[in-house]
Amino acid sequence: MILVIGGPPGSGKTTVAERWAATHRYILVSAGTKFRAMAKERGMGLEAFGRAAEKDPSIDRALDRAILEEIRAKQAAGANVVVDGRIQAHLLSKERIPGLKVLIDAPLEVRARRIAGREKKGVPEAKREIVAREESERIRYKAIYGIDLRDTSVFDFVIDSGEKTPEEIVAMIAARVRG
């Protein structure tokens, strides 16, 4: 089975995907982790790397191709896979790869506080970076793939993580998988 967990920056998608993988023995494929690694390899922060990706679509295409190849390889080997990322639900839908697609979201203020705490920065700075990153991604994914990140129709269900723990969200997903 493939479980896809999408959502904006700071929504908790990676944390939930990691907990799901550990609890349910799924292989984790994380687009966000790969994107951060690519930025670090180039000596860039996420915002600067996002701007570079705006000018060079091959960055996103390479990342997304690598994620799809990894998902297909793990699935072909018989593994259950949980994948987190901003556009993976859209890409898997376009590729007609079946899976349960969950959107995790939270209010901007909540997401900014989470990122500020994780990255040791102020909430206003985190909020500014989130807004800039979301705008960059919205433009890039529309231009490259024709994907509108505001279109949630590809998701099977949506969870507001604003007042939920990762464990509560994992339990909600497990109930949906069993149901």
Image: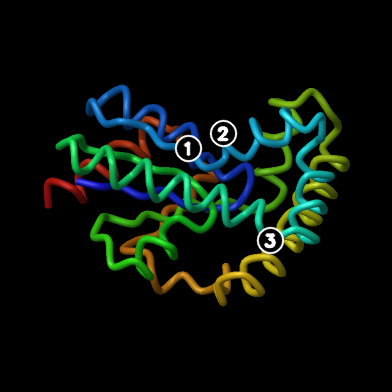
Q: Position of residue 64 (x, y in %)?
A: 51, 52
Q: Amino acid at mark 2?
A: Thr
Number of callouts: 3
* Looking at the image, residue 18 lies above or below residue 98: above
Residue denoted by label 2: 33
Horizontal relation, residue 138 to residue 164: left or right: right
* Looking at the image, residue 121 lies above or below residue 73: above
Residue 55 falls in which quadrant of the image?
A: bottom right
Snapshot colouring: rainbow
Earlier in the chain: of badge 1 and badge 3, it is: 1
Q: Which residue is at 38% across, 47% downward?
A: 69
Q: CA distance from mark 2 to mark 3?
A: 19 Å
Q: Position of residue 20 (x, y in %)?
A: 32, 32
Label 1–label 2 contact, CB within 8 A? yes
* Looking at the image, residue 55 lies above or below residue 41: below
What kind of element bears circle 1?
Answer: strand
Residue 57 shows which numbered tag?
3
Horizontal relation, residue 57 to residue 90: left or right: right
Residue 30 shows which numbered tag?
1
Q: CA distance from mark 1 to mark 2?
A: 5 Å
Earlier in the chain: of badge 2 and badge 3, it is: 2
Horizontal relation, residue 17 to residue 131: left or right: left
Q: Amino acid at mark 1?
A: Ser
Tell which of 15 and 67 is nearer to you: 67
Q: Position of residue 10 (x, y in %)?
A: 62, 42
